């Protein structure tokens, strides 16, 4: 199977998950780039950020059209993660490949376990939102994005629900704004690495992911969210186990 075809298939799956779940698809982008397309872990995290940024912008537009993005609160949440994302992006370029792979596997495994659980519904009472807690959550998410090249939607959505009292639909849409801002901040520290990536692979991957994101948005309207999450979580858990085994061997 050619690299172009593999890039198209992987991109479609990533976009489908991102559009349907508001996050999580980027966690599959990095292992797909490593094991299907032959990228090194460092190059894969950089390429993953480019893919996440382009796909999230598309999905953000789709959610914004239906009024599911809270721009002001989302921008404030994202702002807390800009500097951590940039700093973590610079650190990631200096870490050993095995460390990056192992850390990514652990995060992917935690994301899968979290997705197996029922969706977060508890929200703080009106007026009980704490700015300090919101800033800490935003900074943590930015660090994760910068270090591992993932958007962190699987963490952003529950954080927006529990910390900022968002309804689930608004949390999904707003998480895409947060993901985009953090990804751009991290990419700013990796401009040199990004220039050396294989555009013949990244371009088709992004195009397929963007189309997949639109299909994912439509799929979410037809299939229950919990069912989609369980299927995706099972795939992600298997990928995480494989990556962890590869890192320790």
Image (spheres, rainbow, N blue to C red):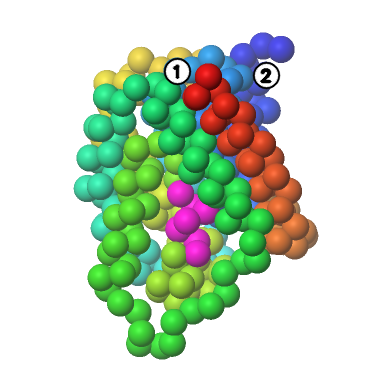
In the image, taking residue 183 as reference, residue 221 lies left or right, namely: right
Residue 40 circle label: 1
Q: Position of residue 196 (x, y in %)?
A: 36, 15
**Residue at screen point 57% across, 27% down:** 245
Observer able to see residue 139: yes
Secondary structure at numbered mark 2: helix
The N terminus: image quadrant? top right
Q: Position of residue 163 (x, y in %)?
A: 40, 72
**Residue at screen point 66% across, 36% down:** 238
In the image, taking residue 53 as reference, residue 95 lies left or right, namely: left
Tell me if mark 1 has few (under 14), some (14-19) or many (20+) residues whose alpha carbon lies within 10 angstroms of its own.
Answer: some
Task: Classify 221 as above or below 36.
Answer: below
Residue 156 within the segment the image draws in magenta: yes
Q: Position of residue 114 (x, y in %)?
A: 58, 56
**Residue at screen point 62% across, 14% down:** 3
Q: Nearer the viewer, residue 44 or 74?
A: 44
Q: Which one is closest to the eye, mark 1 or mark 2?
A: 1
Residue 134 within the segment the image draws in magenta: no
- Res 80 quadrant in image: bottom left
Q: Position of residue 158 (x, y in %)?
A: 50, 64
Secondary structure at numbered mark 1: loop
Q: Could you tell which of marks 1 and 2 lies nearer the N-terminus?
A: 2
Q: Nearer the viewer, residue 83 or 66?
A: 83
Magenta residues? 152-158
Tell me if mark 2 has few (under 14), some (14-19) or many (20+) residues whose alpha carbon lies within 10 angstroms of its own.
Answer: few
Question: Cα distance, mark 1 to mark 2?
Answer: 19 Å
Task: Classify 159 as above or below 61.
Answer: below
Count of labels shown?
Answer: 2
- The residue wearing badge 2 is 5
């Amino acid at each position: 199977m050619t690299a172009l075809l593999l890039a198209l298939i992987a991109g479609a799956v990533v976009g489908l998950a991102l559009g349907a779940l508001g996050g999580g698809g980027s966690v599959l982008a990095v292992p797909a780039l490593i094991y299907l397309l032959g990228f090194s872990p460092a190059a894969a995290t950089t390429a993953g950020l480019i893919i996440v940024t382009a796909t999230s912008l598309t999905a953000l537009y789709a959610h914004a059209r239906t009024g599911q993005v809270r721009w002001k609160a989302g921008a404030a949440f994202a702002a807390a993660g800009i500097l951590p994302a940039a700093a973590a992006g610079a650190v990631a370029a200096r870490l050993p490949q095995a460390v990056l792979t192992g850390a990514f596997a652990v995060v992917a495994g935690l994301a899968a376990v979290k997705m197996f659980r029922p969706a977060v519904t508890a929200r703080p009472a009106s007026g009980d939102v704490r700015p300090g807690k919101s800033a800490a959550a935003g900074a943590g998410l930015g660090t994760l994005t910068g270090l591992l090249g993932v958007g962190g939607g699987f963490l952003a959505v529950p954080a927006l629900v529990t910390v900022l009292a968002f309804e689930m639909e608004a949390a999904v849409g707003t998480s895409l704004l947060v993901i985009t801002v953090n990804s751009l901040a991290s990419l700013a520290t990796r401009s040199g690495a990004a220039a050396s990536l294989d555009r013949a692979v990244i371009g088709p991957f992004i195009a397929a992911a963007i189309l997949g994101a639109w299909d994912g948005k439509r799929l979410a309207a037809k299939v229950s969210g919990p069912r989609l999450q369980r299927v995706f979580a099972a795939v992600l858990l298997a990928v995480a186990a494989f990556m962890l085994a590869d890192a320790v061997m």
